[in-house]
Each structure stands twice: as structure tokens, then as C-alpha cells.
Image (tube, rainbow, N blue to C red):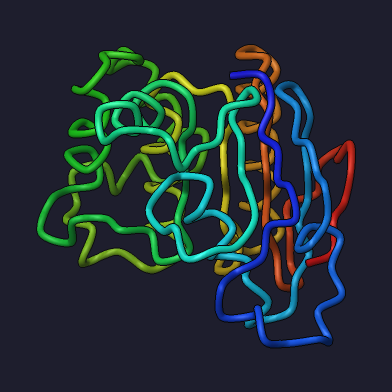
């Protein structure tokens, strides 16, 4: 997948409003593979909704969203399985980890779908993000900031053309946010992937190609 296009897209809940001012909603926007985007937003402006639309979890929007020129409303369940497996990976704001499983088990479940990364690489990421000592700890016993890093590693253990990150450093200090940023920069460069980062204030310090205000 090389492009994601939004054409006059707007969350259905906003349709009756006449005060929506946005660089994305009700605009024509093209996101390109290989580019890094920051989406700055206030709470309640549809930031998480945007990620859910792009990953196909929700369809409560007006307008059109296309992948490489194809309207995503025409995608079948089988098509979406492949999109989520090989084209788009997402770190959700609420993380969606399994609290009863260990940090490594949460990552391994995702990795087993494609065998994208070797165990040695996954362990290296845990080390790089400062949570190597938590690798066999049940996620439910970890802090939210530690869980964010586990969820980020899980998002990386699959092929992708675009990586969606919904408030990925909301519970990280500056040092750990910087470590995460370095890891992400390297991964998207190697994969020649696009990345969309959302933020309601604090965000990863990256060399963004474009910033949108939602």
C-alpha cells in the first residue's frame, strides 16, 4: 500500500455541527508511504476515531477513505484481515493487551501470525526500551507506561506499510519517549513505511514531514 486518501471524510457524530475546523475532516488529504505525520488534536475531535477508520474497526463516517485509490467500504472481511496483517499496524490508545499474559506472550501472539521477527530481535527491543526485566511479567502487573512500550513492540512484529500510533507516549517520561522515537525512526526507515502519530499535547520528537491539526 502506497497511499491512504481521505476525501471529505467526517465522523458521523460531527455531521450536524457547523463549527468543525480541521486539516483532515472535510478536506482532501493524502498520506504517503515513507512519510511521517503528526496529527495534533484536542480531546473529542476524533483522533482515535481516525485510527479506527483507517484500521477498519469503525465505519461511522461520511465521505470516502481509499487505499491506493480503492474505497475501503468495498473491502471484504478477508481483505481487512490481510490489511491488518500485512499493510497497517496500529498502537491503540487503550493498548488492548491481555492482562493475564506476560509481556512477551502478548507480543508472541501477534508475531505468530506472520513470523515477522525473530525472538532475538524482540528481546533486543525489550532491552532498548528499558523493560527487559519485565519480559516475563504479566501485563496486568505492569505500569501503564511499561504497557505502552509492550504494545509498541507488539505493533512492530508484523509487516506494515503504515504504522498508526494513537498517543504512544502519553505515560512516558522524556527519556523513554526519546528511546521509543529512536527505535521507531529506524524501523520505518528500514521498512520504508509511513507513520501517523496522534497527540493531544505531548508527542514523540521526530522529524515530521507534515503536521495536521484535527
Instruction: Determine the image quadrant of residue 43.
Output: bottom right
Tell me what residue is drawn at x 84 percent, y 68 percent. Answer: 22
Tell me what residue is drawn at x 59 percent, y 29 percent. Answer: 67
Tell me what residue is drawn at x 47 percent, y 56 percent. Answer: 52
Quarter in which the N terminus is drawn: top right
Q: Is residue 106 above or below residue 24?
A: above
Tell me what residue is drawn at x 40 percent, y 68 percent. Answer: 144
Image spot of residue 44 (x, y percent): 63, 82
Between 115 and 126, the one nearer to me in the picture:
115
Image spot of residue 91 (x, y percent): 47, 49
Image spot of residue 17 (x, y percent): 73, 87
Is residue 209 left or right of 35 when viewed as pictured? right
Quarter in which the C terminus is drawn: bottom right
Is residue 74 left or right of 54 when viewed as pictured? left
Q: Is residue 149 above or below residue 42?
A: above
Between 144 and 192, the one nearer to me in the picture:
192
Image spot of residue 56 (x, y percent): 42, 47
Between 53 and 143, the one nearer to me in the picture:
53
Residue at the far left in the pictured view: 100
Between 183 and 47, the one nearer to me in the picture:
47
Is residue 111 left or right of 168 when viewed as pictured? left
Is residue 133 left or right of 42 when viewed as pictured? left
Q: Is residue 137 above or below residue 37?
A: below
Amino acid at each position: 500500500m502506497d497511499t491512504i486518501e481521505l476525501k471529505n471524510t467526517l465522523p458521523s457524530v460531527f455531521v450536524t455541527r457547523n463549527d468543525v475546523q480541521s486539516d483532515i475532516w472535510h478536506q482532501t488529504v493524502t498520506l504517503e508511504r515513507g512519510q511521517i505525520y503528526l496529527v495534533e488534536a484536542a480531546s473529542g475531535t476524533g483522533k482515535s476515531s481516525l485510527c479506527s477508520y483507517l484500521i477498519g474497526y469503525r465505519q461511522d463516517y461520511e465521505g470516502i477513505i481509499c487505499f491506493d485509490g480503492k474505497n475501503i467500504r468495498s473491502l471484504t472481511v478477508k481483505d481487512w484481515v490481510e490489511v491488518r496483517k500485512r499493510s497497517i499496524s496500529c498502537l491503540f490508545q487503550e493498548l488492548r493487551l491481555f492482562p493475564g499474559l506476560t509481556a512477551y506472550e502478548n507480543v508472541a501472539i501477534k508475531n505468530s501470525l506472520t513470523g515477522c521477527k525473530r525472538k532475538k530481535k524482540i528481546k533486543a527491543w525489550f532491552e532498548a526500551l528499558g523493560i527487559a526485566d519485565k519480559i516475563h511479567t504479566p501485563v496486568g502487573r505492569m505500569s501503564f507506561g511499561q504497557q505502552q512500550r509492550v504494545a509498541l513492540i507488539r505493533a512492530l512484529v508484523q509487516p506494515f506499510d503504515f504504522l498508526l500510533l494513537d498517543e504512544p507516549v502519553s505515560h512516558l517520561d522524556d527519556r523513554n519517549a526519546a528511546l521509543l522515537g529512536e527505535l521507531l525512526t529506524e524501523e520505518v526507515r528500514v521498512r520504508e513505511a509511513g507513520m501517523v502519530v496522534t497527540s493531544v499535547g505531548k508527542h514523540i520528537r521526530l522529524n515530521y514531514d507534515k503536521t495536521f491539526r484535527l
